[in-house]
Amino acid sequence: MDSHDGPLICPQCNSTLDRAEFERNQWVCGVCGRHSRLGCQQRLSISADEGSFTEFDGAMSSKNPIGFPGYETKLGRLQEDCGVREAVITGLCRIQGYALVIGIMDSRFMMASMGSVVGEKITRAFEYGTERGLPVLLFTASGGARMQEGIFSLMQMAKTAGAAARHNQAGRLYITVLTDPTTGGVTASFASLGDIIIAEPGALVGFAGKRVIQDTIGQTLPEQFQTAEFVHKHGFADIIAPRHTLRDLIARILRIHGCLPELS
């Protein structure tokens, strides 16, 4: 459904969708309500006030710390195809006038796997918010740790979780929006640490894969296991919010928590 050529077919209900209407509906199927995965620029366009985004660390790019074959070539190709240097963009923006630090993970870029640059950018975003008394909002989407960086990838779990903890200890607000998919080491670190955790409908949220868990425990898991609805029912997420409601919901949370509009 993300192709730019030919008709748009919803992979969930097989409906043919009008491209312009689909985009106006924020890339949500108007028939069955399936929320398509978004690139970071699409997400930014429907979340932040127009023209308010200032990017942090935009030129930061991964190295190849363990000499993984072909890694540099793959990174270069994805940078060209996706128009971003890494699997997350971070920066300062406003949402309905409220200033905050925002981070958006992009599943097009190596399934938004968390390597050293992703972890560093998210850590710096938390540190900026902590130092300046700003809330942090992260849209998470990830397949987990980036195997091409080995232990350097796994180290990002502790680093990002520590930055989130320091932000919390300073009395700052942290909001997480779990989008499809949020899995692996990202779920096991900063994605689960929000003061308020929101999930988009139908998002895959979990740690290990469903088949891996079933094979390990020798039991059949519920059909909705690791969906946003399942984790919400079991207390992992605070609210499930359709995409068109997110902007107003986040602004309301910021207002309730006493966050201030950006001063002119």
Image: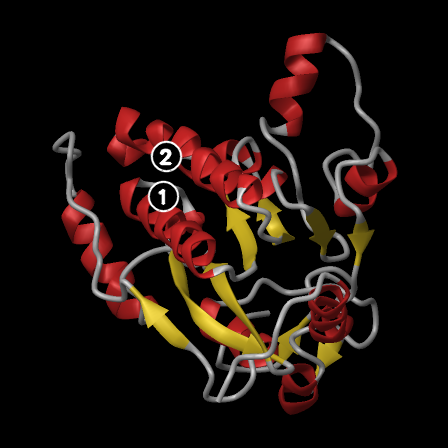
Q: Please give the name of the residue rendered at 79% of the width and 47% of the height, measured from the top-left corner.
A: 238
Give the residue type at disc 2: Gln
Query: Residue 124's x, y, as percent?
Result: 35, 51
**Are the residues flagged by discs 1 and 2 in contact, CB closer than 8 Å?**
yes
Residue 119, label in figure: 1
Residue 264, label in figure: none
Query: Residue 73's x, y, as percent?
Result: 16, 52
Report helix, strand or loop for mark 1.
helix
Disc 1 and disc 2: Cα gap in Å? 5 Å
Q: Please give the name of the residue rendered at 54% of the width and 56% of the height, measured from the top-left corner.
A: 138
Which residue is more in the foreground, 191 or 252?
252
Residue that lies at the very extreme toward the right in this rendered image: 233
Q: Which of the 4 image quarters holds residue 30?
A: bottom right
Residue 97 shows in this picture = yes
Q: Please give the name of the residue rendered at 82% of the width and 45% of the height, measured from the top-left corner.
A: 229
Report helix, strand or loop for mark 2.
helix
Q: Is residue 165 above or below residue 29?
A: above
Query: Residue 145's x, y, as percent?
Result: 40, 34
Colour setup of the view: secondary structure
Q: Which of the 4 image quarters holds residue 108?
A: bottom left
Residue that lies at the very extreme toward the left in this rendered image: 67
Which residue is more in the foreground, 183 or 29?
183
Query: Residue 155's x, y, as percent?
Result: 34, 28
Residue, disc 2: 156
Say which label, 1 or 2, has the lower sequence index: 1
Residue 144 shows in this picture = no
Give the residue type at disc 1: Gly
